């Protein structure tokens, strides 16, 4: 997972990107969450309670990525585990980003090796 002192920065980065792609929002405050709350439930709760964005967590076979509504938040099995914003999937490529790695483009084959196939979607 993200370094203990970097989880808040990572959480807020992903939260803001997800919100901005779902609704028109003004300034979005930073959330100071403990490292043990850096999880799908915290994303879901804040999105629902503070921004009225309904979300759910789904497990999806990667061959069905075409059916995934974007953006989505995924947990990736890299660097001992990290969350990422999945922006798109087209022509066999997965477009994702997070605070640690910036914007990335992976082949579906590579993404299969790093994804745990669980996504938070709206």
Image: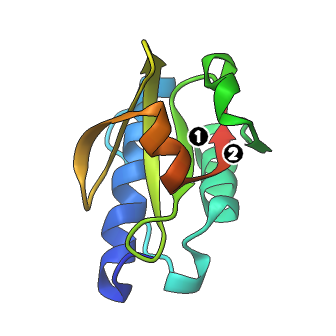
Q: Quadrant of the N terminus?
A: bottom left
Residue 122: name its quadrant: top right
Residue 53 visible to an observer of this rendering: no
The structure residue drawn at horizontal position 39% and vertical position 45%, both measured from the top left corner, is: 16
> Observer-nearest residue: 110 or 4?
110
Q: Could you tell me if the residues under marks 1 and 2 are in contact, i.e. CB atoms within 8 Å?
A: yes
Residue 13 visible to an observer of this rendering: yes
> Observer-nearest residue: 103 or 41?
103
| Residue 96 position in % (x across, y down) | 37, 38
From what the image shows, is residue 98 above or below residue 81?
A: above
The structure residue drawn at horizontal position 45% and vertical position 77%, both measured from the top left corner, is: 80
Q: Secondary structure at mark 1?
A: helix
Give the residue at mark 1: 51
The structure residue drawn at horizontal position 65% and vertical position 44%, both measured from the top left corner, is: 120
Give the residue at mark 2: 48
| Residue 91 position in % (x across, y down) | 42, 12
Q: Residues within 10 Å of mark 2 (few under 14, many from 20)?
A: some
> Observer-nearest residue: 112 or 42?
112
């Amino acid at each position: 997972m993200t370094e203990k002192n970097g989880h808040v920065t990572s959480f807020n980065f992903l939260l803001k990107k997800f919100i901005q792609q779902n609704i028109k929002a003004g300034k979005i405050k930073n959330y100071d969450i403990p490292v043990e709350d850096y999880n799908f439930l915290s994303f879901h709760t804040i999105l629902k309670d503070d921004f009225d964005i309904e979300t759910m967590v789904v497990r999806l076979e990667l061959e069905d990525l075409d059916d995934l509504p974007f953006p989505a938040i995924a947990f990736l099995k890299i660097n001992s585990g990290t969350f990422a914003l999945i922006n798109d999937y087209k022509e066999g490529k997965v477009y994702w980003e997070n605070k640690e790695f910036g914007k990335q483009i992976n082949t579906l084959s590579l993404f299969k090796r790093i994804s745990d196939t669980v996504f938070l979607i709206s």
